[in-house]
Image (cartoon, rainbow, N blue to C red):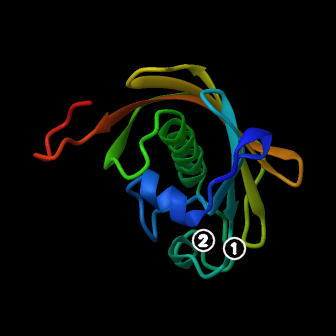
C-alpha cells in the first residue's frame, strides 16, 4: 500500500483484511482509497469461475448477488484500512441492502469496477453507496449496511 491519493490494496493485503477466500473472494485489488470515504475495487470476471458452469450454460452471466457481494467486500477493505484492521481477524456482516438496480449483464472478460462511498461510519456499523461499472457504464447500484467485528484472542467478538 502506498500513501496519499494513490493508496491501493493488492490481493495479499486484501486477504489480510477480510476473511473471504476462493471461490468467494470477489475483489482482485482496490485503488483510489480515501480513508473513511471511498475506494474502487476491481474484479476481473473470467470464464473459469465456478458460477459459470450453472449460470447459465451457453450464456455465462455473472450473478447479480455476486456483484452486490463484491461491492460489500470492497467496502470491507475500505473500513479495514481506515480502522487499521489489517491482521486483526476482523469479520464483516451484511445488515441490509436497499435500492438495488441492475442495468446490464456482466459477462466473462468484463472488468468490474466497484465504486463504494461511505455514507455513515466510524464505529462498528457503516452505511455505503455502491455503483458497479464496466467500461464506464453503470451495471448495478445499491445502498447497503454492514457491521464490522474483531475477534479477540479468545475467539469471541468484541472490539
Q: Is residue 99 visible?
A: no
**Element on which disc 2 rests:** loop
Crowding near the residue tagged with mark 1, few <14, some 14–19, many ≥20 C-alpha atoms within 10 Å: few
**Image quadrant assignment for residue 124:** top left
Tell me where residue 132 appears, x and y as whole percent.
Answer: 72, 45
Left or right placement of residue 42 versus residue 83 in this view: right
Which residue is the site of mark 2?
56
The structure residue drawn at horizontal position 43% and vertical position 52%, both measured from the top left corner, is: 18
Q: Estimate the x, y position of residue 75 in percent, counting from the top left.
A: 56, 39
Residue at the spot x=45%, y=51% of the render?
17
* Front residue (pair 3, 140): 3
Q: Secondary structure at mark 1?
A: loop
Q: Nearer the viewer, residue 58 or 132?
A: 132
Q: Is residue 89 left or right of residue 106?
A: left
Residue 122 in picture, x, y percent from top left:
48, 20
Cβ–Cβ under 8 Å for marks 1 and 2:
yes
Look at the image and tell me in which quarter the N terminus lies.
bottom right
Label drawn at residue 139: none
Q: CA distance from mark 1 to mark 2?
A: 5 Å
- Is 95 drawn above or below residue 67 in the view shown? above
Q: Residue at x 69, y 73 (%)?
A: 59
Please say whether residue 137 is visible from this viewpoint. Answer: yes
Q: Look at mark 1 in the image and give the residue it sits on.
A: 59
Q: Could you say which is closer to the camera, residue 150 or residue 27? A: 150
Q: Quadrant of the rendered structure where residue 43 is?
A: bottom right
Percent across and percent down for residue 27 are 59, 58
Which residue shows up at 67% across the image and 75% down it? 46
Quadrant in which the C terminus appears = top left
Amino acid at each position: 500500500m502506498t500513501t496519499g491519493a494513490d493508496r491501493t490494496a493488492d490481493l495479499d493485503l486484501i486477504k489480510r483484511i477480510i476473511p473471504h477466500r476462493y471461490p468467494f473472494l470477489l475483489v482482485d485489488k482496490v485503488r483510489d482509497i480515501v480513508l473513511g470515504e471511498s475506494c474502487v475495487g476491481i474484479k476481473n470476471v473470467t470464464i473459469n469461475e465456478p458460477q459459470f458452469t450453472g449460470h447459465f450454460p451457453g450464456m455465462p452471466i455473472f450473478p447479480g448477488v455476486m456483484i452486490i457481494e463484491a461491492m460489500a467486500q470492497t467496502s470491507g477493505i475500505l473500513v479495514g484500512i481506515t480502522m487499521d484492521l489489517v491482521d486483526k481477524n476482523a469479520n464483516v456482516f451484511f445488515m441490509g441492502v436497499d435500492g438495488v438496480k441492475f442495468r446490464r449483464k456482466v459477462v466473462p472478460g468484463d472488468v468490474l469496477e466497484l465504486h463504494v462511498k461511505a455514507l455513515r461510519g466510524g464505529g462498528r456499523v457503516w452505511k455505503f453507496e455502491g455503483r458497479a461499472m464496466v467500461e464506464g457504464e453503470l451495471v448495478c447500484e445499491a445502498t447497503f449496511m454492514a457491521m464490522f467485528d474483531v475477534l479477540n484472542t479468545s475467539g469471541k467478538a468484541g472490539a
